[in-house]
Image (tube, rainbow, N blue to C red):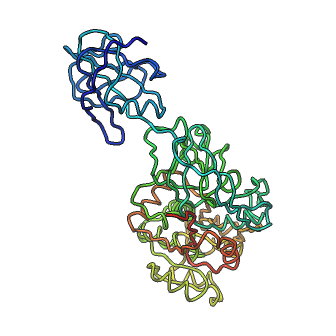
Amino acid sequence: MHRRSQTRLRPPIRFGHPDKCWTIWRIGGEVGEIASRLYEQPARDYTISTGRIKTFGGKDGIDVFRRDCYKRSNFIHRKDVVYKVVQPRYEETSIRHLSATTVSIRKHSSTHCRYIFPRPHFPSKMVNIPKTQTAATVPKLGGGVVFVHDYPVPQPGHNEVLAKVLYSGVCQSDLHTQAGIAASAQGTPITNVKLPHVGGHEGIGRIIALGPGVDEDIKVGTFVGIRFASRICRRCNFCLAGKEQHCIKSTNHLHHEDGSFQEYIALDAGYLTLLPDDIDPVTTGPVLCAGLTTYKAVKNCNVSAGNSVVVVGAGGGLGHLAVQYALAQGAIVYAVDGGGEKGEFLKSLGVTGYVDFTTTPNLIDKIHEITNGGADAVIVTAANPKAFAQAAEMLAVGGTLSCVGIPAERGYLETPISTIVIKGLHITGNLVGSLKECLEAVDLVRRGIVKPKVTVRPFEDLPKIYEELERGDVLGRIVLKIAKDE
């Protein structure tokens, strides 16, 4: 291209939000066109009205300091000033060139010109991402955990982000899935699991790279949750109703995709669990499954202030959160579990009464005694069929039984149909919750109303933790520290 002059750039003017700012490069002297080799896309058409630039078929407008301008052709004119909107190419050479103090132009007229450049977007390929990582794999269901130190790091595809996993809770479902005994909706074992299996669905990560096509409001450095659900269709009746956890085409981080028991993970940017900057990444992880599930269970029971709620399995990872979410609604909570240590812990949370099932001959009679005729709601979080068998008989007239824990073996409710009919009982199940409900559950933890009891353990302890879960020796929730340097 023939260059007629070299025009020096004046200091730029930046405006807009710091994370979404635009820059005006003021070019004195002659109007020019940046050499076409620097740009892949032509200028977009904009108009300025009452201090706002609006696009024609483009993105949302941005605030500017000029007013009362009008559009003509591909330029925006105001007296002797012409605004030319240019889209830079997303390459390092272009970014470097835009930062230079001079730019080559071609003579166009003697009118002053101002070029408007969007803030450059740095693509994920410019981030230093390792090729391999450590992952806790299960090559064969029931075969135990094998740590692989050269497991490939996924590359974020279209509309995906790459996150570095910081912490991850360990769920009973992780135990049952890797053992090959997780129960399906039909009560049969789930065997259609991706192999090698990488579990984990209570993870907290930090976004380190963006794939192509990711929305501009998703930023590198943001905390992100790694939940049970990984992808949804957004079109089925369940998705449209805000019950996307039941999406008919959904995938999850337990059976279909690698979960948070690895150092890096690729996530669908269209269904991200973006978290506030002020969360505690250690205590927030368990909220993404255990907390969400129990928060939803309390909602399903329509708990209100003064209602009596019995939580069975109250000292475990699910149970101690169900206790606190019920207390947050103003309920009078009674806890059922085994052992003095769990009793002292649950009393410290504020339960009105604790019942040790290991020393109580008739649990149903005891619940009716302390609740004055039966509870308004019973939430069963234990993954043991015996805990469900007669739980409905603890209820008062019109009460609700919420089934949360999923036993590995096939279990049944043993309450007579006549009891359910005559007392007008409600029985509901609960599979996690929606993204909206997840963020509500997280907010109660972020504000200190609900306080998960967690024990942080090294990533390498996962096989031992599975053994402890199998024995029922875990109080609260165990959280793995995945990242080595954070």
Please give the name of the residue rendered at 23% of the width and 24% of the height, measured from the top-left corner.
50
- x then y, percent, for residue 386: 71, 76
> Is residue 294 in view?
no
Relative horizontal placement of residue 23, taking residue 221 as reference (left or right) = left
Side (left or right) of 59 relative to 470: left
Could you say where residue 310 lies in the image, as x and y percent from the top left? Answer: 54, 74
Question: Residue sitting at 36 percent across and 33 percent down?
Answer: 99
Image quarter of residue 14: top left
Residue 421 lies in quadrant: bottom right
* Viewer-proximal residue among 7 and 293: 7
Relative vertical location of residue 259 with respect to residue 55 in this rendering, above or below: below
Compare residues 330 and 392 and report the one nearer the observer: 330
Seen at 46% across and 60% down, the residue is: 442
Q: Quick one: which residue is furthest to the left in this view?
A: 79
Q: Is residue 289 above or below residue 91?
A: below
Task: Give the residue drawn at x 48%, y 38%.
Answer: 215
Residue 176 visible? The answer is yes
Q: Position of residue 188 (x, y in %)?
A: 79, 60
Quadrant location of the N terminus? top left
Q: Is residue 482 above or below residue 72?
A: below
Q: 467 left or right of 225?
A: right
Residue 207 at x, y percent in the picture: 50, 50
Q: How many marks?
A: 0
